[in-house]
Image (cartoon, helix red, strand yellow):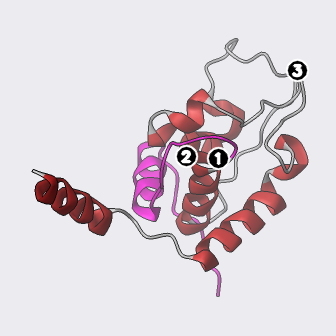
Amino acid sequence: MQANKLFLTAALLALAPVVSADDTETARALYEANCAACHQYDGGGVPMMQPELILSPRANGDVGGVIDMILLGSAAVEPGMSEYSNEMPPFDYLTDEDIALIATYVRTNFENAGGAVTAADVADRRKRAGLEPAAQPE
């Protein structure tokens, strides 16, 4: 029985997405450059202006929730459903990879356990929203 548990654990770990230290540093830098001014470096937000990201239901929910917020900004929230006064702009000009890194950073930091996001996840949400792919850096 113990051997089966070890085998299952090893198999699950082998299938889990690997996030390198470089990816983590890049993700943090992208978050700090694009999100921290409003949501703060510690994810604490600003009361009544920008939501905090700590223990965020959106970050811990379906992978599409955070992606849609980054891609669409405040337009991802149903009218009248936000208690925050500041509008979030869309960040759809960022690449799918950059959005995946930011979303993963938010979903795995600030006491969140939402898990990793892939560039393919972002491309799927971008397509569902009818958005063109972002221009790739040269």
Residue 137 included in the magenta stretch of the image: yes
- Residue pictured at 87% horizontal, 43% vertical: 38
Q: What amino acid does circle 1 point to? A: Ile
Q: Tell whether position 90 is magenta.
A: no
Q: Residues within 10 Å of mark 3 (few under 14, many from 20)?
A: few
Quarter of the image where one finds residue 15 = bottom left
Q: Position of residue 110 (x, y in %)?
A: 70, 44
Give the residue number, with chain letter if any, for mark 1: 70
Residue denoted by label 3: 48
- State the predominant SS element of the stretch in magenta: loop
Q: Does dot 1 land on a helix, a strand or a loop?
A: helix
Q: CA distance from mark 3 to mark 2?
A: 22 Å
Q: Nearer the viewer, residue 129 or 123?
A: 123
The reply to whether discs 3 and 2 touch (Cβ–Cβ < 8 Å) is no
Does residue 136 show up?
Answer: no
Between circles 1 and 3, the one closer to the viewer is 3
Q: CA distance from mark 1 to mark 3?
A: 19 Å
Instruction: Give the residues in magenta.
Output: 110-138
Earlier-in-chain disc, 1 versus 3: 3
Q: Position of residue 58 (x, y in %)?
A: 57, 32
Q: Position of residue 40 (x, y in %)?
A: 87, 45
Please state which amino acid type lies under the numbered disc 2. Answer: Ile
Q: Residue at x 82, y 42 (%)?
A: 39
The quadrant in which residue 104 appears is: bottom right
| Tag 1–tag 2 contact (CB < 8 Å) | yes
Residue marked by disc 2: 67
Secondary element type, mark 3? loop
Quadrant where the C terminus is found in the figure: bottom right
Q: At which x and y percent is residue 60? A: 53, 35
* CA distance for labels 1 and 2: 5 Å
Q: Is residue 3 left or right of residue 131?
A: left
